[in-house]
Image (tube, grey):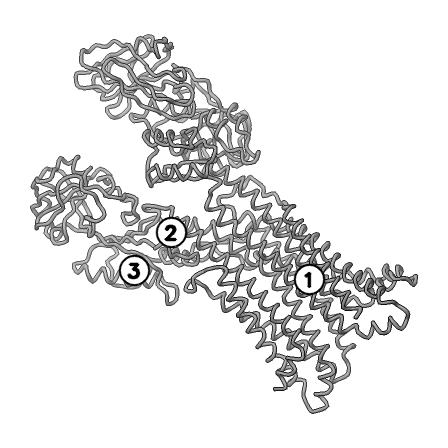
Amino acid sequence: MLLVKRMRHRAAVFAALLVVVAVASGLIVGILEFLSTAESSGVRSQLAQRAGADAALQLTLASDPDGAAQDARVHRLIARVFRDGDRALPVDITRSQVSSNPVQLSTGVKAFVASIPGLESNASLVDGAWPRAPGDASVQADAAAALGLTPGEELTVGDAKLRITATWRLTDPLDPRWVSDSLLMQGLRGVVLGPIVVPQRELDAIGAATDTRWAIVPRVATVGAGDLDIIIGGWRTMADSLSADRGFNLDSLDLGGEFVSSAAEVQSSVSALGAVSPAAVSVIAAIAVIALVELGRLLATLRSTEHLLLFSRGETVGALTRGACGETAGVAILGSVAGTVVAVVLVGQPPGLLGATVWIVPATATAVAVAVVGTTTFLAARSISRMQGLEANGRMARMTGLAAPIFLGIAAALAVWQLRRYGSPIIASRGGGTQVDPIAVLAPALALIAVVVLVLSATPLLRAPLDRASARSTRPALVSRSLSRRSRLFLAPFVMYALAAGQLTLAAGYAETWGSAYATTAALRAGSDLVMIASQSPLSESVLSTVRGLPGVTAVAAIDSEQIEAGGNPASMIAATPVAIATLASSAGGEFDARAAARAIAVPFTGPVLPHGVADVAVSLTSDSTAPIELGLVVADDLGVQREIRATGDHRFELPLGHGSWKVLAFVVHRSLDGPSELAITSLTADGLDIPLGGGWSATGFTPLAAALPGPPAGAGFSGAARESTVRVTPPFGDLSGRVVPPILISSALAHAARIAVGDTVKLSVDALLPAFDSVVAGIVSAIPGAESDSAVLIDDSLVEAARARLYQETPTPAAAWLGSSNPAKASAVVREAVPGGITVGALVASEDRRVLGSAVTALWFGAVGAGILALIALVTVAGAQLSTRAREVFVLRALGISDRQLVSTRRIELGIVAAAGLAVGVGAGIVVAALTLGPLARAAIPASYAALPTEVGIQPLGLAIGLAALALSLGLVIVDYARRVSR
């Protein structure tokens, strides 16, 4: 009862303690859970964009005679490997069997056979009916066409006689369960066709050795960020786990699928959110501890008389300390739980997905509060009992004041050195993934606290100037003497407002630094504001035509992207036409001059050009055959979009509408057995206008191997093509034998790695079909838009397309497309609905990565707001403590003739100067720390950042100004209330 009465008597202090603990716990839990939720959301959203093998793992083992027992054992092993404590990670497992080798058919060829449970519900019939009777089988439709099999046919497969009843294709070839198996998607693996699908009993009757495959597909909707390490580590040690089990035949062991690579890539892009957590919550924790110290001191001061009375009744220091700890524990538990509950509700994370944060933080907050209040009570009670408070406390203060700056400075210097040495707070983990560096990640918070404490430790140097300023007996003298002689009274408000202002400056700095660097990097990596990438499905002519006609899409540019060799060094090649670069390439905030780049790489086209708007093209030719000639025309518009158009019977072509003019890249002659061996194109007209053919044409025949053919003395044509199935007749523009030496732009990373300078000749090896050719470096830029790697080359796509039109039998599809739109975000949704699922569509303004990684900015702003709130609460606490500890001073000053008005003004100026100085020091410290640490911290949150692009540290002025105004306003309100209470 006595304890309750004593608490009730000091209800205001305990109420303040409850608020401090509640606010600190709520803010820390809220920020950590917010970042954790954002991280998991980012993982799920990015993994949801993966398809086929990128979203699955595949385990292959030689089939056991007892397939059911083998399957059960594999399921148990997977459950053990993919486990987080008592929780098994949710994965979907599908099992199938495929012959280890092709099986002989009675038709004289070999094919793969398989047993695929559930195929009927995941494939669409092309012809026939699904197998129902013993001996029935189905075949992948493309393989069936190549094998000449139709429903109703009977054949012998291995040792079994089968009847084909159905042909089929996968309903969703990009379903992860198929692991992008070309056998199931296209009916072909290497040069062997299949599969012929039969039930398990028929597979046994065939007598072929088989492999069993388990497709393992993690359930993306429930995968958390922390699960990726388990999956990555578990899969990389799967072979060891299988070996340790001693129950598996590992002769045919194969680990396939690309989910681990996808997971590692996703993990590296979102793990930076974990690096922001300490920067966001450390200062909050520091201010909360200071507030608790002040509350503990205030409670001890208010209870000093009570302690004397209790000592006279036989109480001990230990008993008083235990009582204070008990009181604090009850209040702190209530506050921490309340703050945590509010934070969890606001974050909105389902309770089942919450981590250990929700109990670690409140437990820690309670323990810290008990320790702080218990320590201050113990020291105060012991001082009173021994009557040596001033001397003992003075020695303790001097020792603490000397040691704290030294230890904090060393710790901060180590953390900053570690961060800047590695250039990132993210390091590789033992399991092959990534993790946060526990030392480097503390650099911003430690450095900020260290700078503030170092400035604070230098305040005794101001004593002499303040004493000289107080030589005259005026009101400023009273203020200066108070600040000089009683500086310990003002340490807490100075430190709290300095830390709050520093945290605000760091938040404003990170927001500006990360936002600018992310926008630049994302724009350069994408290449354009709206892009399509052929990740699993080709960007065929029909796809590009469909997209060109969609509402909101104003232009479509074909982009070729390849991994090449440039001067013997690996590099990414981006091939785009000058018009595409000038109109659609991203400038990345001025980092890339698109128009200058377009001018630098342009190669004048030498060949027929069809004017913009023409619709009817006619060709006249002569040949040595009277058989009908099947003629094609390959053209490309100013944006690099190619069309291969078949002619009508009179060798006329209907041209679609393109962007600008059409360049003629090739005439294609499809020869029959009695087709022409010699042919000459004599004229070309467009809407009746004669188009000069020019000279220098060449011909390439395909059998299907490419071979150069002789042409006529002048004009376009060929001879000696009696054995060719297809002949391509091309203008001289695509000749890479030295006639054309194209100018290129290279990235600074490639220039540095290969020691290349402007004007140097660089040999490019693009692919196996195109010969290596010389190019000349026209310029060096920091980065090439759209390139996958830092080392990159930009070349005129008109030349690459012309070269491929000469040496490729089929017109290749582009790797990517840049789209023009006045509203990329809206257009991206329309395009995404119109294209196949294997094509990735991205818009810079609607980037999911930006939303997820931008959560770090939000968290730091929340941290700054929380630091300000705690600083305000702590300042109110300090003001209340000063009212109690300086009550006798008021009577003395009044006795000396100081009026209440002068007293109020003096106290207002004292607290105002201290808090304003804290704000100024905090902003200065924040700027220094931002310059030292925010570059690497922000860079870690930028996927695929460029090494050649420095991360420029900046400060967001509007956010900083609003935050400082809020801090100043709160300071003014507290000072006004404090001064009003002094005069009572």
Residue 852 lies left or right of residue 960; in this view the side is: left
**Marks 3,1: beta carbons within 8 A:** no
Q: Which amino acid type is shown beneath numbered disc 3?
A: Leu
Q: Residue 772: where, in percent of width, then height?
A: 40, 27
Callout 3–callout 2 Cβ contact below 8 Å: no
Residue at the farthest right position: 472
Judge from the rendering whether residue 397 lies leftward or rightward of residue 789; answer left or right.
Answer: right
Residue 493 sits above or below residue 847 on the image:
below
For disc 2, the marked residue is 260
In three-dimensional space, the C-alpha distance between marks 2 and 1, rounded to whole angstroms, equals 46 Å
Say which label, 3 or 2, has the lower sequence index: 3
Q: Nearer the viewer, mark 3 or mark 2?
A: 2
Q: Secondary structure at mark 1?
A: helix
Residue annotated with mark 1: 496
Q: Is residue 400 visible?
A: yes
Mark found first going from the N terminus, 2 or 1: 2
Work out whether residue 922 or residue 702 is closer to the camera in this orientation and state it.
922
Q: Which of the 4 image quarters holds residue 869?
A: bottom right
Of residues 337 and 96, the one nearer the viewer is 337
Give the secondary structure at mark 2.
helix
Q: CA distance from mark 3 to mark 2?
A: 18 Å
Q: Position of residue 822 (x, y in %)?
A: 48, 32
Residue lying at 36% horizontally and 63% vertically, measured from the top left: 83
Relative vertical location of residue 955 with respect to residue 745 in this rendering, above or below: below
Which residue type carries mark 1?
Met
Compared with 191, 440 (above or below) is below
Neighbour class for label 1 at 10 Å: few (<14), some, many (≥20)?
A: many
Question: Image quarter for residue 652?
Answer: top left
Amino acid type of the residue that numbered disc 2 sits on in the rendered structure: Val
Closer to the camera, 590 or 745? 590
The answer to whether 501 appears left or right of 579 in the picture is right
The residue tagged 3 is 242
